[in-house]
Image: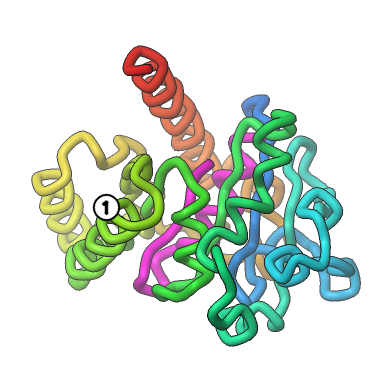
């Protein structure tokens, strides 16, 4: 179970969640994408309109629906969705001081974990540290961080690492950093090269070898309600996400093997 998170907006976070989920499904994994952002961009980007969102993550977190009852089939074979809607923005106030309010998503996901319905669960978070992000990190095994190749990237990443440490210390000791993926990479821009070099020197092997290029087809796809792999499979963005999916699978296999050896 992976959280796709960055506390800085505009870094390609939702785009990565949508297209990584699609790419994982394309290589044979059974994937559930949870849209945990009240804006609902992941839902829209997968072509799930407001009229199709009869039950959403809001209903699940408020205990009104079992998680599996809120699942919506997408047009991508092997990729399911728990949609979002604006009601999610009120979750923090509505849950108030309820017991286990930080574990609502973990508790709701327990049946899906037990029956092995999905090999990967991806959670797309809002670009902020709030109860929705905390719930996602409390439920997850690891965090995948999309990082835009621009000047303030490392500053935002440092803040996120502090958040991961806080969650690990108080809510989820097993939470790990699965990896950092460089997004909106432009080889013609020396700044992209410099940021990539700085991030790799600071985080080493935690940074994926795959980089996601700045690509107009990736930007166009959401307006058609499609992942870029469906919109234009042959473009550089689609090929990069397929490569990233293979790298994620290899890392997850290694991580799971290490856990088994330790146990």
Residue 98 included in the magenta stretch of the image: no
User: As rendered, which of 257 and 172 lies closer to the eye?
Assistant: 172
Q: From the viewer's perspective, is residue 54 above or below residue 210?
A: below
Q: Residue at x 77, y 69 (%)?
A: 59
Q: Position of residue 157 (x, y in %)?
A: 24, 62
Q: Residue at x 13, y 56 (%)?
A: 194
Q: Residue at x 53, y 35 (%)?
A: 242
Residue 24 included in the magenta stretch of the image: yes
User: As rendered, which of 13 and 219 lies closer to the eye?
Assistant: 13
Element on which disc 1 rests: loop
Q: From the viewer's perspective, is residue 124 above or below residue 28?
A: below
Q: From the viewer's perspective, is residue 189 above or below residue 175?
A: below
In the picture of the structure, the residue carrying the numbered disc 1 is 187
User: As rendered, which of 224 and 180 lies closer to the eye?
Assistant: 180
Q: Position of residue 158 (x, y in %)?
A: 19, 63
249 displayed left or right of 153: right
Of all residues shown, which one is farthest toward the top? Answer: 261
109 displayed left or right of 77: left
Residue 48 lies in what quarter of the image?
bottom right
Q: Position of residue 141 (x, y in %)?
A: 45, 41
Q: Residue at x 25, y 39 (%)?
A: 206
In magenta, the rendered stretch is: 1-26
User: As rendered, which of 29 and 227 lies closer to the eye?
Assistant: 29
50 displayed left or right of 215: right
Q: Position of residue 225 (x, y in %)?
A: 74, 63
Residue 162 lies in what quarter of the image?
bottom left
Q: Report whether residue 67 is seen.
A: yes
Is the C terminus in the top left, top right, bottom left or bottom right quadrant? top left
């Amino acid at each position: 179970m992976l959280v796709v998170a960055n506390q800085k907006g505009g870094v390609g976070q939702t785009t990565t969640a949508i297209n990584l989920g699609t790419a994982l499904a394309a290589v044979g994994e059974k994937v559930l994408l949870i849209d945990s952002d009240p804006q609902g961009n992941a839902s829209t980007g997968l072509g799930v309109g407001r009229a199709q969102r009869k039950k959403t993550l809001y209903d699940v977190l408020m205990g009104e629906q079992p998680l599996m009852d809120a699942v919506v089939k997408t047009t991508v074979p092997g990729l399911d969705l728990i949609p979002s809607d604006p009601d999610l923005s009120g979750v923090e106030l509505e849950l108030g001081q309820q017991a286990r309010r930080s574990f609502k998503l973990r508790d709701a996901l327990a049946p899906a974990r037990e029956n092995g319905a999905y090999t990967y669960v991806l959670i797309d978070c809002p670009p902020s540290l709030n109860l929705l992000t905390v719930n996602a990190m409390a439920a997850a095994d690891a965090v995948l961080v999309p990082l835009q190749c621009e000047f303030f990237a490392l500053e935002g990443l440092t803040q996120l690492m502090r958040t991961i440490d806080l969650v690990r210390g108080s809510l989820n000791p097993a939470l790990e950093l699965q990896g950092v993926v460089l997004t909106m990479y432009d080889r013609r821009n020396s700044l992209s090269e410099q940021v990539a070099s700085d991030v790799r020197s600071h985080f080493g092997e935690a940074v994926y070898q795959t980089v996601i290029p700045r690509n107009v087809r990736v930007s166009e796809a959401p307006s058609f309600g499609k992942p870029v792999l469906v919109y234009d499979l042959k473009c550089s963005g689609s090929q990069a996400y397929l490569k990233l999916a293979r790298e994620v699978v290899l890392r997850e296999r290694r991580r799971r093997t290490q856990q088994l050896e330790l146990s």
